[in-house]
Amino acid sequence: MTTYIVLINWTELGAKNVRESPKRLDAAKKLLGEMGGSFKSFYLTMGEFDMVAIVEAPDDAVLARFALLLSSGGNVKTRTMKAFPEFAYREIISSLG
């Protein structure tokens, strides 16, 4: 499984309906699970982003579909980063020679 960091902001619509946000999170967790992935952690944050999720998915295409489906609901906008765990980081750096 590949790990991704998903940075999330509410849209104007999402902020207006913020009380429904926990239900939307539950639906997002279910959707990603049905796609073969999972949420590892989720945070409400202060600052540039409203929420941050650490998720796993089988591949980039699955995560891309998931992010597009989330955004198509109109409540959030996402920015996604592929994350390399420490062992992969060490392998990448050691391969530099």
Image (cartoon, rainbow, N blue to C red):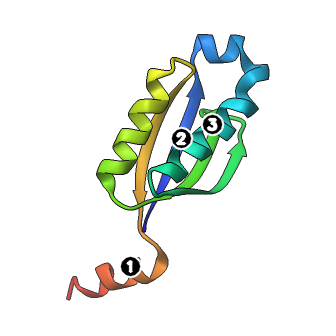
- Secondary structure under badge 3? helix
- Residue 7, numbered circle: 2
The quadrant in which residue 51 appears is top right
Across and down, in percent, residue 39 comes to 60, 55
Amino acid type shown at disc 3: Ala
User: N-terminal of the two: label 1 or label 3?
Assistant: 3
Amino acid type shown at disc 2: Leu
User: N-terminal of the two: label 1 or label 2?
Assistant: 2
Q: Between residues 45 and 74, which one lies in front from this camera angle? A: 74
* Left or right position of 43 against 71: right
| Residue annotated with mark 3 | 27
Across and down, in percent, residue 58 comes to 38, 62
Q: Between residues 65 and 36, which one lies in front from this camera angle? A: 36
Q: CA distance from mark 2 to mark 3?
A: 17 Å
- Secondary structure under badge 2? strand
Residue at 39 percent of width and 77 percent of height: 89
- Secondary structure under badge 1? helix
Across and down, in percent, residue 23 comes to 72, 31
- Residue 88, numbered circle: 1
Relative height, residue 88 to residue 75 (above, below): below
Relative height, residue 37 to residue 43 (above, below): below
Q: CA distance from mark 1 to mark 3?
A: 31 Å
Residue at 43 percent of width and 37 percent of height: 67
Residue at 46 percent of width and 57 percent of height: 36
Direction left: furthest residue? 97
- Marks 1 and 2 in Cβ contact (< 8 Å): no
